[in-house]
């Protein structure tokens, strides 16, 4: 067990270092921060943003003299921002995951990994943890701006909801990256890997729409597989055990399929 853990840590450090020395990774991070910054500004200050809606409600209350039910604007901001972040991940994460194994194939180092004493499971877990850690470092600066935006909320917002929402964001990212890693192990083309990952994730995200047109137990089962459905449940502040199980299942599935893919390559080289 100690040997496996040390192998995972070694692969993790190698993978994480490759992101922090890659100019392309910094370009992705810069674009990600720019787009999320625009989302945050539009949600807060846009024509249809939170502050404009609050001012309109105050004006309506003053004009008609009718007391309006209180609206939790802090909660609405967090939910709207995390919802937009979930949509953005569909485009960002396939780019992050496309080179996890495809680059190894292109450089000819995948054969070395496949025939090395390090287990394929350890390699897959280490690579997934590396790219997930890089994604988390991309998200962390956003927490500062969210804290500033929520600082003036009245009444103060409980930290439970934003923490659960960001936990859901990390789980969603881990599930997408895990499946993207498997697809990356099938090809030496990073572009093809990104496109296929985007197509698969798009299907898993919006499969709930397809399920609604199908009645019966099959439609309900199909809808349960939707990543977006469970993500939306958690960003609303609802801790659902079934959502945790679904995300964990996708993460495990991606790691398992990746290990099997590299095992197949190992047998081809023998």
Image (cartoon, helix red, strand yellow):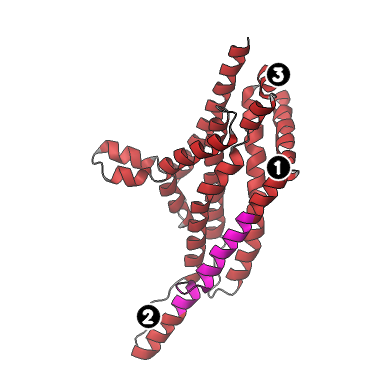
The overriding secondary structure of the stretch rendered in magenta is helix
Q: In x, y percent, where is residue 181?
A: 57, 34
Mark 3 secondary-structure assignment: loop
Counting residues from the start of the chain, the first of labels 2 and 3 encountered is 2
Magenta highlight on residue 241:
no
Q: Is residue 21 left or right of residue 262?
A: right
Image position of 149 with respect to 262: above or below: below
The answer to the question of whether label 2 and label 3 lie on touching residues, with beta carbons closer than 8 A, is no
- In depth, the one of 174 and 150 nearer the eye is 174
- In depth, the one of 193 and 217 nearer the eye is 193
Q: Which mark is residue 68?
A: 2
- In depth, the one of 217 and 255 nearer the eye is 255
Tell me the CA gap for discs 3 and 1. Answer: 23 Å
Q: Which residue is mark 3?
A: 116
Q: Which quadrant is home to the N terminus?
A: top right
Closer to us: mark 2 or mark 3? 3
* Range drawn in magenta: 31-54
Local crowd size for mark 1, using a 10 Å CA cut-off: few (<14), some (14–19), many (≥20): some
Q: Which residue is mark 1?
A: 19
Local crowd size for mark 3, using a 10 Å CA cut-off: few (<14), some (14–19), many (≥20): few
Examine the rendering and report whether any part of residue 101 can be seen: no
Image position of 80 with respect to 242: above or below: below
């Amino acid at each position: 067990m100690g040997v496996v853990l040390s192998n995972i840590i070694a692969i993790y450090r190698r993978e994480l270092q490759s992101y922090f020395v890659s100019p392309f990774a910094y370009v992705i991070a810069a674009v990600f921060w720019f787009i999320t910054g625009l989302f945050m500004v539009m949600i807060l200050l846009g024509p249809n943003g939170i502050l404009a809606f609050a001012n309109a409600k105050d004006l309506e209350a003053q004009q008609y003299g009718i007391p309006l039910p209180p609206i939790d604007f802090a909660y609405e901001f967090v939910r709207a921002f995390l919802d937009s972040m979930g949509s953005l991940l569909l485009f960002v994460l396939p780019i992050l995951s496309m080179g996890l194994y495809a680059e190894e194939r292109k450089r000819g180092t995948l054969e070395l990994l496949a025939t090395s004493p390090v287990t394929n499971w350890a390699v897959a877990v280490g690579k997934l943890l590396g790219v997930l850690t890089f994604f988390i470092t991309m998200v962390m600066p956003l927490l500062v701006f969210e804290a500033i935006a929520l600082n003036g909320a009245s009444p103060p917002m409980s930290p439970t909801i934003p923490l659960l929402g960001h936990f859901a964001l990390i789980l969603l990212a881990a599930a997408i990256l895990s499946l993207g890693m498997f697809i990356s192990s099938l090809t030496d083309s990073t572009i093809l890997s990104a496109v296929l990952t985007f197509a698969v994730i798009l299907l898993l995200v919006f499969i709930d729409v397809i399920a609604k047109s199908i009645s019966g137990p099959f439609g309900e089962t199909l809808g349960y597989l939707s990543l977006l459905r469970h993500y939306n449940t958690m960003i609303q502040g609802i801790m659902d055990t079934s959502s945790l199980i679904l995300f964990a299942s996708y993460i495990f599935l991606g790691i398992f399929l990746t290990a099997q893919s590299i095992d197949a390559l190992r047998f081809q080289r023998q």
